[in-house]
Image (cartoon, rainbow, N blue to C red):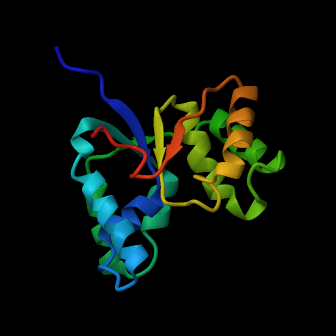
Amino acid sequence: MSAVKSRVYIESTIISYLTAVPSRDLVRAALQQLTRDWWATRGQYDLYISQFVIDEVSGGDPTTATERLAVLRDTALLATTANAALLARDLVRAGDLPPKAMVDAFHIAVAAVHGLDYLLTWNCRHIANVEMRGRIEGTCRSHGIEPPAICTPVECSKE
């Protein structure tokens, strides 16, 4: 009997850190390595993305964008539903996220509406932000939706 796998939404920053040229900045290099270490365990999870992830990782240098898209090849694509769009708008309207972070609101909303367990990100400004987390969770719950646990690769580990 196999265990049920946790369902994880992979936000764009994870793919960026995973595929980036190793940094000479010690902190960034450490985050890149932590991302690669987590990615090596991805078989323990069911992975999901949205069109917003594809759009974000498709930008920039075409060769690098192709590399980023390649690592997502076997990742399930979630639809952006009307409920997700409404929740994203309300996350911004309620002040949980600033207007410039609308795409971040959509990452949260898509993961929440589809009932995923985790949203994996390195975006600590607008998504994995301890000061915003409670408000984000409250807005999701006001829509009758249980939010995913928002975490970094350090926090989302089965080891």
Q: Tell me the residue at 67%/36% (across/down).
A: 137
Quadrant assignment, res 48:
top left
Q: Is residue 85 left or right of residue 21?
A: right
Q: How far from the left and from the top, in percent, is residue 117? A: 46, 32
Work out whether residue 125 or residue 30 is closer to the camera in this orientation and state it.
Answer: 30
Q: How far from the left and from the top, in percent, is residue 38? A: 29, 52
Work out whether residue 147 or residue 158 is closer to the camera in this orientation and state it.
Answer: 158
Q: Check the image and name the residue furthest to the left.
A: 1
Total numbered labels: 0
Q: Tell me the residue at 23%/46% (across/down).
A: 41
Q: Is residue 147 left or right of residue 44?
A: right
- In which quadrant is the C terminus drawn? top left
Q: Check the image and name the residue furthest to the top.
A: 1
Q: Tell me the residue at 59%/36% (across/down).
A: 81
Q: Check the image and name the residue furthest to the bottom.
A: 24
Q: Tell me the residue at 49%/65% (across/down).
A: 56
Q: Is residue 122 left or right of residue 4?
A: right
Residue 34, above or below 114? below
Q: How far from the left and from the top, in percent, is residue 110? A: 56, 40
Work out whether residue 125 or residue 130 is closer to the camera in this orientation and state it.
Answer: 130
Residue 20, above or below 102? below
Q: Check the image and name the residue furthest to the right.
A: 94
Residue 80 appears in the picture as rendered: no
Residue 16 appears in the picture as rendered: yes
Q: How far from the left and from the top, in percent, is residue 29? A: 35, 75
- In which quadrant is the N terminus drawn? top left
Q: Is residue 93 left or right of residue 45?
A: right
